[in-house]
Image (cartoon, rainbow, N blue to C red):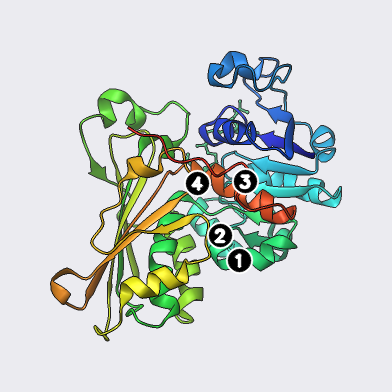
Amino acid sequence: MIKVGIVGGTGYTGVELLRLLAQHPQAEVAVITSRSEAGVAVADMYPNLRGHYDGLAFSVPDSQTLAACDVVFFATPHGVAHALAGELLAAGTKVIDLSADFRLQDAVEWGKWYGQPHGAPELLKDAVYGLPEVNREKIRTARLIAVPGCYPTATQLGLLPLLEAGLADPSRLIADCKSGVSGAGRGAAVGSLFCESGESMKAYAVKGHRHLPEISQGLRQAAGRDIGLTFVPHLTPMIRGIHATLYATVADTSVDLQALFEKRYANEPFVDVMPAGSHPETRSVRGANVCRIAVHRPQGGDLVVVLSVIDNLVKGASGQAVQNLNILFGLDERMGLSHAGLMP
Ligand SMILES: NC(=O)c1ccc[n+]([C@@H]2O[C@H](COP(=O)([O-])OP(=O)(O)OC[C@H]3O[C@@H](n4cnc5c(N)ncnc54)[C@H](OP(=O)(O)O)[C@@H]3O)[C@@H](O)[C@H]2O)c1
């Protein structure tokens, strides 16, 4: 059994990790932290977990207790893994960080977007960006995984086939993305209130969102050159889900894009390329570790429209983190992750 620790167990990605790991035959959650709920039994706070974690209670983060685990997930705001990861890695514990702390390879760039200096630049050389569809081999031997963000997962998986094949003009890419409210976490904020976010939809951070440099970094690697990306996130009145509508121009309109996407993801257990003409729905991936994609070329023109949907808490966070755990420990990548989405 892999002994697992989770820092930040009361947040939405933390409780999603607990839900997924409850079905995982090779992982056992030994430590789960919360500063505000220390001493409270997990199932008392999250009754959906009753019967799964008898005897497990939240505790204050303690590096010695965490270091006794084989792997520690960080489901915390940025900056927390910076402070603790070094000590855990030195003790031989692997780290899977769901926050943005180790996603950008450039510490100065990170500081610019996150408004504080990078807290552990010396660890960046060890960090592997945990997008298995790109970095599977590096993940196998890593000790520090930076799990991609939700918008970056949906956007990169949607655009990678076009950029890797050198088909799309990399200088004019558009990602028009919609997120459910759980993307903002469980912390109380006026914008996340039911009366503020229900029956309404709005764009935000058009000037520049923190996920922009992360998406650009991945797309630049895929294209092998600089890229120009306009990324516009929106808040929508659903609890879970990301819907990315992606636009790219292609010079060669004779290429069979459906075949290109099907071939790129033929061996990927968690990317589903839908039949030509499809419109994936966020509800089809609720609770599932799946990115569902459809590719269109309206009116046969040179503008390609890719539709990419994920559950922000699963393939966009905790599911992808468990996928990384499986790869890291040499298990079947699908272990504990093979359930279908919830319907309706
Ligand atoms: N929500 C999503 O859809 C999503 C998707 C992808 C990635 N992420 C990223 O995943 C991380 C967690 O997101 P979330 O939505 O689960 O956040 P959240 O709901 O706000 O939960 C944050 C958790 O971190 C703990 N925490 C806060 N400050 C801490 C500190 N200084 N030291 C130790 N623990 C601390 C909190 O518990 P206590 O305060 O009680 O300790 C809580 O359990 C974030 O970095 C987020 O950007 C989120």
Where residue 112 appears, as percent x and y from the top left, is 50, 58
Which of disc 2 and disc 4 is earlier in sequence? 2
The reply to whether residue 168 is visible in this rendering is: yes
Q: Regarding mark 3 in the picture, which secondary structure is present there? A: helix
- Callout 1: helix, strand or loop? helix
Tell me residue 298's x, y (percent). Answer: 17, 69
Whether label 2 touches label 1, CB < 8 Å: yes
Where is mark 1, residue-wise? 135
Residue designated by label 3:
322
- Give SS at disc 4: loop
Examine the rendering and report whether any part of residue 119 can be seen.
no
What amino acid type is highlighted by mark number 3? Val
User: Which label sits in the foreground, 4 or 2?
Assistant: 4
Of labels 3 and 1, earlier in sequence is 1
The disc at residue 37 is: none
Q: How far apart are the alpha carbons under marks 1 and 4?
A: 17 Å
Mark toward the start of the polypeptide (3 vs 2): 2
* x and y percentages locating residue 339 in the rendered image: 51, 40
Q: Is mark 1 within 8 Å of ligand 1?
A: no
Q: Residues within 10 Å of mark 1 (few under 14, many from 20)?
A: few
Amino acid type, callout 4: Asn
Q: Which residue, given by chain and number where applicable, does mark 2 sit on?
A: 131
